Structure formats: structure tokens, C-alpha cells
Amino acid sequence: MKNPNLTTLLISAALFLGLGVSNLLHAQGTYRLTGKPVLTVMGGSTIHDWEMSSAQSQGRAEILVDGTSLKHVKSANVTMKAESLKSGKDKMDGIAYDALKTKKHPDILFTLTSFKSLGGNKGLATGNLTIAGTTKPVAFKVESSTKGDMVYLSGETAIKFTDFNITPPTAMLGTIKTSNDLKLLFKVNFQQAVLQ
């Protein structure tokens, strides 16, 4: 070699760039809930199906992204005001809030305990869900996608009112009865937090 210093410099630069790319491909970071997260509760009754939705939540997560794929969620927590759930009918909302004991327990909470990749863009997010002051383990089937510093997640799970010590609501002196079975669906966006 005519110039050993130049060779050393080129090798060092290649190693540096290689490590930089590797770190980008396997970047774990803190992400915060952004935009308008949507949580929908769907159920039935003796007269019709119903749903309530909220677009007001706060949360953060530690997420590992590999290239353009979500590989792992190390931790996550989401908090939502129970009274942000709306059906479009004030009377129904009031009955729901009574059942959810929102005066005593204003928040609905989810804390992730484990995340398992199921291949492709699918995964299983297991955690503790707290409703009306009662905490139970739940598992959400989730789908994910990424773009830039954004991670998009959607999923669903089935629960029951009685899982959370809630008596299924009734109306019209008990003539209208709500089904015990519920479906929870969510669609949220997490954005990587900027280091201060």
C-alpha cells in the first residue's frame, strides 16, 4: 500500500458507517401516543347493537423497529378518561358512566406485560387492563406498520362486563338488557420522542 494512513482511514470509515446503519436497522426508542387515538367498545342489547368511541388517550412505549418493521414492544402504557367514550346519545352515555363507576374511577388504563411477534406485521400484546377499578389480564391481536418515525398499531380483543365486576347495564326498568360480551378495538399512532 502506498498510503497506509489512507487505508486505515477508509477501513475506519467503513466500520463507522456499518455500525451506524446497523443501529438504524435495530433502533429501540421511546415513542409517544400522537394524533387522535381511537378506542371503540362494541356490544349488543335486547334491541340493537351499540358502540362507544373515544379519541382522547395518552401513552408511551419502548419500541424496537428493524428497518420498516416493528420487531418488539418492550413496554407500553395507555390512559384514557372513561367519560371520553361517547355513543352519540347522552342518556346511553350516562347509563354507561354509572356502570363504569366513572366518578370513583375516572380512568381506563392498559399496561403492557409482554409482546410476541406472530410473523409479518402481526403480534400479540398481553397486558393488564383496568376498568372501573378492577384490573384483569387481556391479550390484543395487533397489526403494525411503520413510516419514518411513526409506528401505527391496531388491534382487538373480547372481554365481558363481569370480568371487571360490572353488572351489564339495563334501561327502561330492566326491559332493555345489555349483553355481557364486549369487543374492544383500537387504532393508535406512536411517534418517536425527540431527545432533549
Image: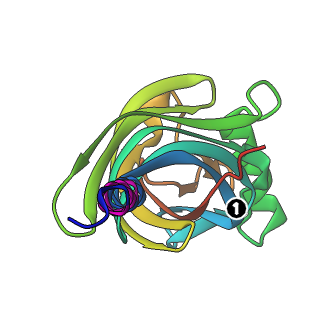
Q: Who is closer to the viewer here, 40 or 80?
A: 80
Residue at position x 20%, y 69% in the image? 120
Q: Is residue 4 magenta?
A: no
Figure check: 102 above or below 30: above
Residue 13 shown in magenta: yes
Q: Give the quarter of the figure containing the N terminus.
A: bottom left
Asked where in the image residue 2 lies, by quadrant, the reply is bottom left
**Amino acid under label 1?**
Thr
Looking at the image, can residue 155 be seen? Answer: yes
Residue 22 appears at what percent x and percent y? 33, 56
Tell whether 154 sits left or right of 173.
left
Give the residue number, with chain letter if any, for mark 1. 34
Place of residue 98 in the rendered image (x, y in percent of width and height, measured from the top left): 74, 39
Q: Front-most of 148 and 180? A: 148
Circle 1 — which element? strand
Q: Would you call the spot at circle 1 few (<14 residues within 10 Å), some (14-19), or many (20 or more)?
A: some
Q: Find the magenta span and give its range.
A: 6-16
| Front residue of 170 and 137 | 137
Q: Is residue 139 left or right of residue 187?
A: left
Magenta stretch: helix, strand or loop mostly? helix
The quarter of the picture where residue 102 lies is top right
Kindly identify the residue that appears in the image at 47 percent across and 40 percent down: 161
